[in-house]
Image: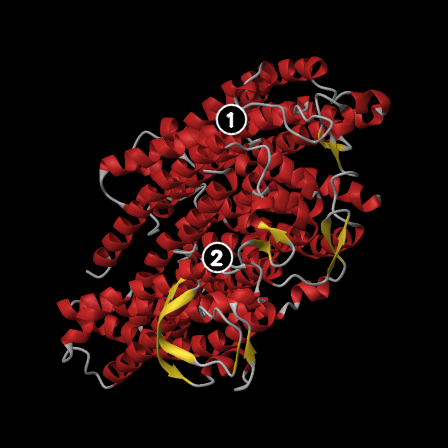
Amino acid sequence: MSVDLLSSLQFATVAVFHFLFVPLTLGLSALVAFMETRYVQTGDEIYLRMTKYWSRLFLINFAVGVVTGITMEFQFGMNWAEYSKFVGDIFGAPLAIEATVAFFLESTFIGLWMFSWKRVSKKAHATIMWVVAAASTVSALWILLANGWMQKPRGFEIVAGHAQLVDFGALIWNPYSWVKLFHTSMSAFTLAAFFIMGISAIYLLRGKATDMFKKSFRLGATVGLAASLLVIVAGDFSGRQVADFQPTKLAAMEAQWTTVKAAPFYLLEVPQPSAERNVVEALGIPNLLSVLSYHDPNATVKGLLDFPADQRPPVAVSFWSFRIMVGLGFLFVLIALIAVIFSWRDKLEKNRWFLRVMPFAIALPYLACELGWILTEIGRQPWIVYGLLRTRDAVSRSISSTDVIISLVGFVLLYGALAVVDAFLIVKYSRKSAE
Amino acid sequence: MALQILWFILWGVLWAVYFMLDGFDFGAGMLRRFLARDEDERRLSLAAIGPVWNGNEVWLITAGGATFAAFPLTYASMFSFLYLPLLLVLFSLIVRGVSIEFRNKSENARWRSVWDWALAISSLTAPLVLGLGFGNIFQGLPIAADGSYKGTFFGLFNGYGLLTAVLFIVLFLQHGALWLEYRNGGKLAERARAFASTVWFVVLGVAVVFLAATAFATKLYDNYLSRPLWLVVPLLAVVSLLAVKFLHTKSRSLGAFVASCATVLLVVATAIVGLFPNLIPSSLDPAASLTAFNSSSGPYTLKVMTIVAAIFVPIVIVYQFLVYRFFRGKLTKAEGGAEY
């Protein structure tokens, strides 16, 4: 395999793995801070127990998220040196700012929070967790500003073969990034909510510490319903932006081969990329694709065949990751709605079937979050910076296939081991602390 | 022009502060497997770095990010030329981080022993490879006139590169021992103290050999020969190393640690002053060297980054300092058994 394919594969591996830990950090940090604040406000011990229980799981997850994050920053220079040279003037800035403004705060304060339980006032301790939660969201913002520039480059000019920043305001007010922040945050809260509900369900079934887990479940259900509804709003914004900013991604994720005015949306669709058509197109809703993409029933949706073949993203991956993500998004609202009804009416224990389903449902928002990133990145191909630089031209020239095979095998082994240890600890601590 | 020089200085400062901070938790990480003799001591020696290691490591992320933002050509070259060594650094840092966080998460003796060893080894390999990398950067990397890299992985294992690695390791052993002594009491502190007393002589010996070898293997002294005033930097490095011994003999453990911080800062500063204006000199063709002037971002980006750094770096320094002050003094047994 070529260096650029291997490097892409490696990037996908380390990014997907890293993002297994990021959304739970984003969502659960704020929820733990909320639990601790409720403890400060009410003095009710149950909130303290909840804070301690969920923060233990949070910290195990956080540790793996932190260490796998270092890889992300190193990757650009190690494997994508030509990319780094091309965009360094622009892309490096948000990464450096992320570390300076947010990651320092997050890392320093999480250490303080862990080791200051009895040494600062309750109020101060809860405030420290809010700082961690806020810093992790600010951190996500700067990373998304960097990624946003790859998706929708702006505020630059090309000087001597590389992009040079001319307008920092354009970089930080990139609408793509802000919508992505909204989308990512709400997905993170959905994921954290399902995580809390799934684990609580196990202990409600076993009748252990039911007071604490009922309260946790109710919190998860409420946050889950609000967040999953907002994800749909965010998804609509995202879809509109893709239509405007990245028409090739839109065509690929919708498997739209031909250009159509007033395009329908098919509920059932199966693309056959080799034949450049769809083998199944059924249950069409007239004009819906035009409405979804441009909020205009008569808008024209440009098809893949009207783009040069060397500018089309992989259709099957884009299409299926999008379809499954959206399907899951609606499923989350449904599940969260049932969860809200059962938990607020105190009917959870009477509906044991629902409690039995919920632990398995934890996997679904993880899948949806990963599919979202797969769509974002694969749908942008063959570009690494949309319309400006191709992925195959971005790879380091000084590394060999052997180098990347060594590193890829190393990452797979190391990350595999980390996954096993992390899963073991999450299971162990969710049990141990429930006693 | 002025901004490029300013960012060169900041680049040096970020690396220096990174080594000053992560240096002692590298050292403590290497040593605690051997200095701590029972479970209480093992927990206490871990609690000495537990709250701060993560914040320390962000200085590396910031140094990397700042290199990317201010000197993208250097960032791209440094990270892709030194691909396999950086992979080893990365793996070491990953193993280290989870070792610290996961070690106390099981009562199982074997589990703890595995993580204790993992922490000790990864705390050794990280500075080893970083030292090896910097030793080679000080000598110059084989960058051809067309900007291509002619080096190999095994070519990095040359005498001066290995010497720099040894210097990093012994400096951090001393640094970590002084930190363990300062944060702990009892037998653990006594053993750390005894180790620090002995290793000081090793540091001195390696430093002398390193300073002499630098004259032969690198061009770092050229700047000092043309501007002798700057010799005050290496001179202060030597003075701070002497101060470590002086304060340590007087049982001023915090003072000795602070002096050791100064030593690490000044040793890195000595090299950075010698490098200027190069970030990565070329050993093949001086014109192919990556400098603050030919590898930097445009003036606009540098201006934006200067404003961001001017506001936020002081803030970071202030709150990290306050957190260190919060965790000052001797650890109590209860803290060793802290619930996380």
Residue A371 locus on image (x, y percent): 40, 62
**Mark 2: which amino acid?**
Ile
From what the image shows, is residue A231 above or below residue B67?
Answer: below
Task: Name which quarter of the figure residue B95 lies in.
Answer: top left
Residue B79 locus on image (x, y percent): 59, 37
- Residue B128, which numbered label? 1
From what the image shows, is residue A382 above or below residue B183?
Answer: below
State left or right for residue A122 relative to residue A83: left
- Secondary structure beneath dot 2 equals helix
Identify the residue shown where x is 57% and y is 54%: A383
- Secondary structure beneath dot 1 equals helix
Nearest the viewer among A374 and B138 is A374
Q: Which residue is mark 2?
A: A378
Identify the residue shown where x is 37% and y is 43%: A415
Contact between marks 2 and 1 (CB within 8 A): the answer is no
- Residue A242, which numbered label? none
Give the mark count.
Answer: 2
Camera-nearest label, 2 or 1: 2
Residue A28 visible to the viewer: no
Furthest-front residue in this view: A275
Chain of the residue under the numbered disc 2 shown in the image: A
Nearest the viewer among B37 and A403 is A403
10 Å crowding of disc 1: few (<14), some (14-19), many (20+) = many
Task: Name which quarter of the figure residue A210 lies in.
Answer: bottom left
Q: CA distance from mark 2 to mark 1?
A: 38 Å
**Mark 1: which amino acid?**
Leu
Residue A134 locus on image (x, y percent): 52, 65
Identify the residue shown where x is 29% and y is 33%: B113
State left or right for residue A213 relative to residue A384: left
State left or right for residue A260 relative to residue B122: right
